[in-house]
């Protein structure tokens, strides 16, 4: 009776996890120990997959542990990598566990770029292997019974988990073996078998008959549910697997119900309800009789039948001679109770007892994304504070340059170069002068062009693949059932559009820098000249040495010194602001562990406010101080200007000094802008190269998926019937000679009227009969050695009339009469319409061979159409 159902394993194609995952790790983490450990973990994950899926597994607990370890690792690694079709694209291919394929095409399989699909299929294999291990247990001892119950409940829970999650994990129609209907049915079957094991243990432990009856009744109920589920879904019985399972489920339902009635009859006897005892035993006997008559090849019930019959015979004998109790109808009997001792085991990773996360030090993607956004917020905060200070410094420099300070205080002689102007000139020369700026300006277009080329090439890869996808979609229509490239590439195209917008803005910024350079180019060139030429270019003015010791000059100098001190404080503060560091990953990880989600905005803003609030206050105080001092400087400068003896030469000299001071400030700003632009383009190049790699990876994955789908389509087309029934041409169905006789056989059979007049035996023709032997005189009017009537020849007798119209003599395959599957690309109509082999009209006396000569070389039978040279579909 102990016939238990197990589930076959799914098979997967090999997948290289090392290359794409290592590339992501290298692009995400800086070179160092952390990156090395992550790459080592990637190699360990690849090794885990090969051990779990790349080799045959024994039906042992150690093999199940390997599969569960890989499943647990997939669950642990899922949040740490951006597995998706448009990011980290890994295509997993799995075959249908129940579909065994056809003669010319392979079994049904599905390839998806989804880690959820991989997890689902691995969990299916864990459940299937658990069912196989349970079915191998020795149920004659307690250890075997406990192990079988444990593994059946594990299998039931795994199948139930797949039922609830498969559609969301795949986002498309799954193969039939992992569809919700199939795995739901398998879960019920495993649960029923676990309940049956508990029934067997209760029987072995000789528990009370009332308890055993309830356990058996519950098992019968579970088997009934599973059987109904199989029948309710029309697509399940098409599997050969379920064709074998259905009778077992029906038999088990009857057997468990019979056991329940048997043990309940013992309880009735104990309560002296002898009529009920007989009624239950009779019902049990009918149930096992049904099993024996219908399902004997699947389940043996001889022992149970004998036991029930013995009990029934004894009960009837006692009732007939002693008790004379009325035997009630079965429908009037009290329902037997139910006791469910099993339940589907919940799937809560880790399932493996020896699991350890090899990516333990790698933070989840949610934390990585939050860290990226936090980094952007921090950069914006730093740029805002530093930019505010630089803007204030530029404003201060502009105001002082417009007042010709401090040059006006240093130029009291009226004929020498002011000290501040001389220092500015030396500073420009030390920084490379005009040549350095012109070289930076010259490099920008090359950097821009390189970035544009990378971006254009990346988007062109997407365009080309999308064009190919659209062409194949229009060619195959609904058969081309993968995600359209246009939908899949939307995030990448949005990212590419953002890059192009950034480049356009960068071009505008470059033009602003060039315009500013053109405005101050002449004065910058003057500052780059030797001191003697610079001095000669500055107009002379009347001496104003009398102002050197005045109070106004001293006050101005003190105020300028105060402004210089403010600038130095800002430089130091800028370094401090840029040097602030804080590890937000701990905060995000804590939030993720506590709440299951990360409120990045709230956490980041709170932390940034804590880090930079003091600096923000210092910056604002610096701005207020500068505003106050600049007001004092302007007031003091008015007094200083009124004391100076003004003339045209002095005005010209002061104007030139102002332009020289402004040229120095512009030089510093232009150089900073150009270096910043160069760094921007170089950094953008790295980002665009990563974007290009992302596009290249997804295009390569899509190409692999496309090739796989094309191969599946070709196989599915090959599995479809390609030789429909059609009318036989006249030359095959009508005798060539007027002599009446039997039906004309296939063209390869020689017609013999003497044999046609004999009684027909209707033998089955061989799969491929040999061609008839011909003599050189086959074309003559009278055969040289004609066999006498009734003498056997090498030719088979004429065939019986066909039941339906037949086509050319295709080769038949055992087990598929009337249905011929052609190889992929085979043209069943080649040779019709205009025949490639001309038909020769029958001539000569009856019995003569219908072929003028031996078959041509390379073509065994003229009636066969030939394989076309080109396949229907392009080979990738």
Image (cartoon, rainbow, N blue to C red):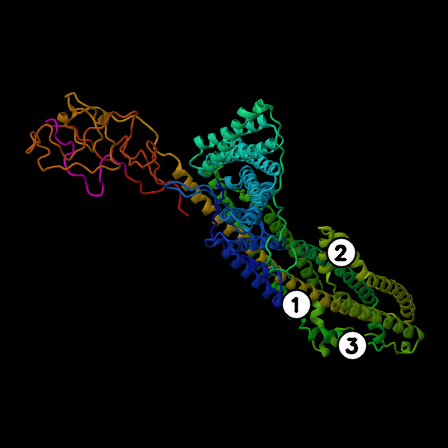
251 up-or-down from 429: above or below: above
Q: Residue 229 in the image: state x and y as whole percent.
A: 54, 33
Marks 1 and 2 sit apart, C-alpha to C-alpha, by 39 Å
Classify 10 Å Cα crowding around label 1: few (below 14), some (14-19), many (20 and above): many
Q: Residue 557 in the image: state x and y as whole percent.
A: 88, 73
Q: Which residue matches tag 3?
A: 417
Q: Give the range drawn in magenta.
A: 843-865
Q: Residue at x 14, y 25 (%)?
A: 753
Q: Residue 598 in the image: state x and y as whole percent.
A: 72, 52
- Front residue of 146/490: it is 146
Classify 10 Å Cα crowding around label 2: few (below 14), some (14-19), many (20 and above): many
Q: In terms of secondary structure, where does tag 1 sit? A: helix
- Front residue of 169/256: it is 256
Q: Residue 394 in the image: state x and y as whole percent.
A: 79, 64
Q: Which residue matches tag 2?
A: 604
Verify whether residue 195 appears in magenta: no
Marks 1 and 3 sit apart, C-alpha to C-alpha, by 25 Å
* Residue 398 seen in this snapshot: yes
Q: Which residue matches tag 1?
A: 437
């Amino acid at each position: 009776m102990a016939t238990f159902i197990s589930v076959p394993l799914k098979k997967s194609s090999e997948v290289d996890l090392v290359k794409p995952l290592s590339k992501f790790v290298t692009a995400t983490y800086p070179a160092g120990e952390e990156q090395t450990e992550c790459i080592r973990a990637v190699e360990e994950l690849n090794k885990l997959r090969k051990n779990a899926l790349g080799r045959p597994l024994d039906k042992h607990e150690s093999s199940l542990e390997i599969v569960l370890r890989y499943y647990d690792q997939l669950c642990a690694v899922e949040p740490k990598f951006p597995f998706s079709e448009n990011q980290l694209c890994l295509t997993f291919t799995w075959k249908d566990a129940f579909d065994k394929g056809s003669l010319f095409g392979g079994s049904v399989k599905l390839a998806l770029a989804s880690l959820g699909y991989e997890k689902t299929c691995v969990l299916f294999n864990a459940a299937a292997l658990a069912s196989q291990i349970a079915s191998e247990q020795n149920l004659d001892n307690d250890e075997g019974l406990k192990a079988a119950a444990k593994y059946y409940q594990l299998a039931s829970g795994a199948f139930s988990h797949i039922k609830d999650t498969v559609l969301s994990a795949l986002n498309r129609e799954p193969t039939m073996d992992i569809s919700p209907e199939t795995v739901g049915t398998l879960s019920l079957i495993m649960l029923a078998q676990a309940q049956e094991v508990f029934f067997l243990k209760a029987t072995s432990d000789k528990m009370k008959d009332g308890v055993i009856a309830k356990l058996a009744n519950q098992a019968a109920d579970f088997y009934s549910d599973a059987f109904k589920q199989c029948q309710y879904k029309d697509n399940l019985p098409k599997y050969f697997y379920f064709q074998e399972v259905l009778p077992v489920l029906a038999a088990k339902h009857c057997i468990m119900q019979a056991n329940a009635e048997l043990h309940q009859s013992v309880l009735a006897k104990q309560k002296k309800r002898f009529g009920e005892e007989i009624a239950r035993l009779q019902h049990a006997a009918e149930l096992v009789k049904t099993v024996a008559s219908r399902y004997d090849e699947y389940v043996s019930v001889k022992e149970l039948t004998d036991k029930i019959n013995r009990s029934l015979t004894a009960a009837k004998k006692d009732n007939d001679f002693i008790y004379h109790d009325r035997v009630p109808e079965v429908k009037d009997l009290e329902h037997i109770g139910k006791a469910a001792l099993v339940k589907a085991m919940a799937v809560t990773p880790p399932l493996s007892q020896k699991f350890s996360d090899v990516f333990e030090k790698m933070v989840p993607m949610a934390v990585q994304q939050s860290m990226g956004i936090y980094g952007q917020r921090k950069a914006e905060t730093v740029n805002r504070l530093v930019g505010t200070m630089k803007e204030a410094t530029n404003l201060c420099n502009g105001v002082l340059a417009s007042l010709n300070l401090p040059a006006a205080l240093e130029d009291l002689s009226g004929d020498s170069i002011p000290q501040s102007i001389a220092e500015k000139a030396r500073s420009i020369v030390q920084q490379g002068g005009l040549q350095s700026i012109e070289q930076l300006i010259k490099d920008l277009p090359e950097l821009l062009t390189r970035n544009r080329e990378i971006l254009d090439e990346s988007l062109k890869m997407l365009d080309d693949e999308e064009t190919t996808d659209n062409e194949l979609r229009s060619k195959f229509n609904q058969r081309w059932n993968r995600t359209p490239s246009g939908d899949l590439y939307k995030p990448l195209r949005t990212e590419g559009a953002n890059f192009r917008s950034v480049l356009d803005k960068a071009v505008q910024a470059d033009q602003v820098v060039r315009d500013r350079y053109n405005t101050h180019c002449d004065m910058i060139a003057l500052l780059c000249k030797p001191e003697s030429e610079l001095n000669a270019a500055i107009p002379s003015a009347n001496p104003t040495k009398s102002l050197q010791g005045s109070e106004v000059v001293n006050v101005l100098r003190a105020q300028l010194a105060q402004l210089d001190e403010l600038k130095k404080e800002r430089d130091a503060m800028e370094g401090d602001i840029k040097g602030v560091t804080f590890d937000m990953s701990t905060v995000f990880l804590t939030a993720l562990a506590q709440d299951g989600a990360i409120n990045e905005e709230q956490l980041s803003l709170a932390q940034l406010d804590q880090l930079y609030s003091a600096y923000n206050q210092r910056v604002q105080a610096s701005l207020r101080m500068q505003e106050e001092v600049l007001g004092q400087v302007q007031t003091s400068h008015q007094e200083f200007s009124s004391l100076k003896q003004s003339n045209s030469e002095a005005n010209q000299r002061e104007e030139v000094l102002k332009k020289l001071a402004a040229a120095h400030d512009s030089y510093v700003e232009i150089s900073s802008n150009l270096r910043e632009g160069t760094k921007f383009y170089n950094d953008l190049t790295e980002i665009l190269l990563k974007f290009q790699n992302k596009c290249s990876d997804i295009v390569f994955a899509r190409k692999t998926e496309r090739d796989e789908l094309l191969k599946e389509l070709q196989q599915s087309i090959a599995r479809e019937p390609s030789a429909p029934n059609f009318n036989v041409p006249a030359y095959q169905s009508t005798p060539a000679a007027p002599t009446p006789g039997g039906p004309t056989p296939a063209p390869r059979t020689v017609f013999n009227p003497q044999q046609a007049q004999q009684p027909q035996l209707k033998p089955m023709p061989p799969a491929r009969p040999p061609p008839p032997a011909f003599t050189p005189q086959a074309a003559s009017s009278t055969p040289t050695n004609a066999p006498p009537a009734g003498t056997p020849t090498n030719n088979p007798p004429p065939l019986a009339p066909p039941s339906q119209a037949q086509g050319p003599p295709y080769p038949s395959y055992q087990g598929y009469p009337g249905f011929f599957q052609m190889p992929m690309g085979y043209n069943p109509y080649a040779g019709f319409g205009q025949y490639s082999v001309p038909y020769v009209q029958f001539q000569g006396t009856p019995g003569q061979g219908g072929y003028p000569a031996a078959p041509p070389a390379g073509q065994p039978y003229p009636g066969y159409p030939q394989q076309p040279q080109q396949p229907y579909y392009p080979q990738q």
